Image: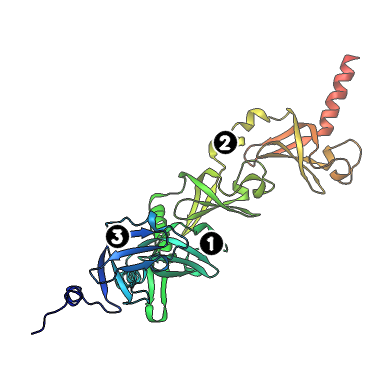
Amino acid sequence: MSEQSFEQMLEESFKTIRNGEVVEGTVIDVKPDEIVLNIGYKSDGIITRNEYTNEPNVDLTTLIEAGSTMEAKVLKVNDGDGQVLLTYKRLAAEKGSKRLEEAFENKEVLTAKVAQVLNGGLSVIVDEARVFIPSSLVSDVYEKDLTKYDGQEIEFVITEFNPKRRRIIGDRKQLLAAQKAELRKALFERINVGDVIEGTVKNVTDFGAFIDLGGADGLLHISEMSWGRVESPKKAFKVGDVVKVFIKDINDTKIALSMKFPEDNPWNNATEKFAAGTVVTGRVARMTDFGAFVELAPGIDALLHVSQISREHIDKPADVLKVGQTIEAKIVDFNEADRKISLSMKALLKDEEAAADAEE
C-alpha cells in the first residue's frame, strides 16, 4: 500500500463543493468591493459587491465585519484565479422568493421599503426578492406622480406569484380600501344629525367643499358655508384647512354639512337691531329690475324697492346704484315671520326735509 503525499492528504482533508451548493463560511477579509470567506475548502470564497447587494457603489466594509459567519451559494468552483465565486444576493433572493410565496398563499401583509420608482409603478425588495406594484395598485386614488414614495416603507399584499415569468405583483390599493371601509363603518356608527365635528378640507369646487371626516367625505355646500354671502368657495377655503362643521343631514352614505350654526344666526337679535323706523347703513349686494337687495349684516338682506330709491322716477336700480355701494336708508317694514325687511331711501329724504323745516 503506497503512502500518500502530504499534498494528497491535505487535498482530501478539504470538503468537496459543487456549483449551486449552499455553503457557510467565516469572513476573513472585507474590502470595499468584495468579501473573502473561509468556507473550509482549499480555496477561499469570494463575494463581489454585485453578488452581495443590488445597491450600487456601496462600501462593503460598512456592512460586513471580519469574523462574522454567513451563507452563500457557489456560482463557480474555480473563477479562473483559483478562487470560489460565491453569491449572497441570489441565495437571499431565493429565500426571499420562498418568503413571498408563503405570504402569497397566506395573504400576509408585508412591509418593505420602496427601492425604485418606475414609470409604471413601484419596485420593492423583500429579502433581496423584487416585487412590482403597478401604478394602478399603489393607491385607491389616482396618483400621477409616485416619487413621494421613493425610500418610504409601505404595506402591501402579494396578489400574483409567478417567479418563472418573473411576475411577483404587490397590491397596496386593497389594503387602503379595506382600512377606509373600516373607518367609514366606524364613522357612520358614531355620528348623528346635529353633531359638531372637525374635518379637513379635501377638495374645493365652485359649488362647495368636500370635507374629510375621517372615514367619509361630507359636502359643505356654498349655501351652508356662512350666514353671510360667500362669493367663491375657493376664496374661502383651501385644501388642508381644518374646519368645524355640524352634520345637517345623513342620506345613506351621503353627508351634508353646514357652518351656519344656529347660535350664530343673525336673525336671532334682528328684531331689536332692525325694527321699523331704524336708520341703517348697508352694502348693495345684488340688483334686479324691481329693486336692490342691501346687506345690512352677514346673512340679512333687505329689499330697497325701485320706487323707494328716489322721489324721481327711476326705471331700474342699476341706473343710480351699483353693487358694492354703501347706502343709508330707513327701515319701513320688518316681517320677522317671513324674515323680510323693506327699506326706503325716499323716506329718509322726507325725514331730513321735515327736520330742516322744523329748524326754520
**Does the CB distance between marks 1 and 2 fall below 8 Å?**
no
**In whole angstroms, how far apart are the C-alphas of marks 2 and 3?**
78 Å
Q: Which mark is residue 146?
A: 1
Residue 58: x %, y % from top left:
44, 59
Q: Quadrant of residue 119?
A: bottom right
Is residue 107 visible in the rendered image? The answer is no
Quadrant of the image containing the C terminus: top right
**Residue bearing the label numbered 3:** 28
User: Disc 1 or 2, which lies upstream in sequence?
Assistant: 1
Q: Is residue 166 visible?
A: yes
Question: What is the residue that sits farthest to the bottom in this orientation?
Answer: 1
Query: From what the image shows, is residue 247 above or below residue 60?
Result: above
Tell which residue pokes out farthest to the top in this image: 360
Q: Callout 1: helix, strand or loop?
A: loop
Among the 4 quarters of the image, the one containing residue 49: bottom left
Q: In this orientation, which residue lies closer to the viewer: 305 or 197?
A: 197
- Residue plotted at (86% across, 46% down): 316
For the point 45% across and 56% down, which residue is it? 152
Whether residue 352 is situated above or below residue 270 in the rendered picture: above
x and y percent of residue 246 in the render? 50, 45
Q: Nearer the viewer, residue 303 or 241?
A: 241
Query: Residue 264 got which mark?
Result: 2
Q: Nearer the viewer, mark 2 or mark 3?
A: 3
Which amino acid lies under the numbered mark 1 shown in the image of this protein?
Answer: Leu
Q: Residues within 10 Å of mark 2 (few under 14, many from 20)?
A: few
Spatial separation of the CA atoms under disc 1 and disc 3: 43 Å
Q: Nearer the viewer, residue 19 or 231?
A: 19
Q: Earlier in the sequence, mark 2 or mark 3?
A: 3
On the image, which quarter does residue 64 sit in? Answer: bottom left
Residue 3 percent location from the top left of the image: 11, 80
